[in-house]
């Protein structure tokens, strides 16, 4: 087994990958969510940067400065999104394991992890076939609880 596969195996074991909730029993596949410019979000969209594979990076702010960035990537199947979460966790430079987001009061997605900061400035979650990463990037941390819940609701609505 090569180093990358061994690292993936160890991370899956550390994070309890086999017990992760998979929406709809791992078969729920949602269409594109309503545009994340929706009025349900606490901040207005500043820019959208298309990424490969149908994903995008959005920036949100108060009209003067970017406060939050959101990376949204759809996958063909929920299991692919869960594997992408492992890839993301492999790239994290923070000590492992990262805390589950619900332990920080951020219950979002089928599986979610928060950064180590207090208040939380980064959150990654999978909902069905979507991987979402949210980062507070302003000088003062922007509260992510309502923001992440709004994005999760838009994905769950499946519009």
Image (tube, rainbow, N blue to C red):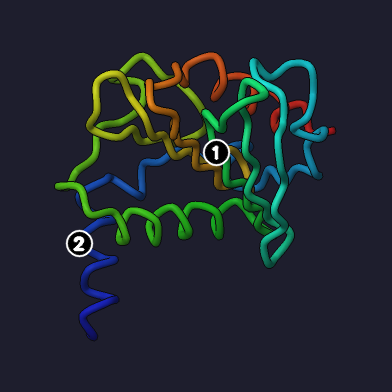
Q: Quadrant of residue 12?
A: bottom left
Give the class, few, some or many, for how many residues have Cα within 10 Å of label 2's Cα (few <14, many ≥20).
Answer: few
Q: Left or right: 12 with respect to 49?
A: left
Classify 10 Å Cα crowding around label 1: few (below 14), some (14-19), many (20 and above).
many
Q: Is residue 30 above or below residue 88?
A: above
How far apart marks 1 and 2 lie (CA) works out to 29 Å
Extreme residue toward the bottom, this view: 2
**Considering only order in the chain, which callout, 2 or 1, is on the residue closer to the N terminus?**
2
Residue positioned 57% across, 29% down in the render: 65
Classify residue 56 as left or right of residue 89. Answer: right
**Which residue is label 2 attached to?**
10
Mark 1 and mark 2 residues within 8 Å of each other at the beta carbon: no
- Across and down, in percent, residue 106 comes to 41, 19
Q: Residue at x 62, y 26 (%)?
A: 64
How far across and down, in percent of the image, does residue 103 sit? 28, 20
Residue at left 28%, top 45%? 16
Instruction: Name the residue that disc number 1 marks.
Output: 69
Front residue of 23/147: it is: 147
Rendering coords of residue 73 (x, y %): 63, 52
> Residue at coordinates 46% horizontally, 59% vertically from top-left?
83
In the rendered image, residue 151, in percent from the top left (x then y), is placed at 64, 27
The quarter of the rendered structure image containing the N terminus is bottom left
């Amino acid at each position: 087994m090569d180093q990358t596969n061994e690292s993936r195996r160890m991370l899956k074991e550390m994070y309890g990958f086999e017990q992760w909730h998979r929406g709809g029993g791992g078969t729920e596949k949602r269409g594109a969510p309503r545009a994340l410019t929706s009025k349900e979000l606490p901040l207005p969209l500043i820019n959208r940067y298309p990424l490969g594979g149908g994903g995008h990076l959005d920036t949100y702010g108060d009209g003067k400065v970017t406060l939050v960035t959101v990376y949204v990537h759809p996958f063909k199947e929920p299991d692919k999104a869960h594997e992408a979460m492992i890839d993301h966790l492999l790239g994290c430079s923070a000590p492992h394991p990262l805390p589950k987001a619900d332990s920080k009061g951020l219950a979002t997605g089928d599986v979610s992890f928060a950064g180590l900061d207090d208040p939380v400035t980064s959150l990654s979650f999978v909902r069905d076939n979507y991987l979402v990463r949210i980062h507070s990037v302003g000088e003062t941390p922007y509260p992510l609880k309502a923001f992440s819940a709004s994005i999760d609701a838009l994905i769950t609505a499946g519009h």
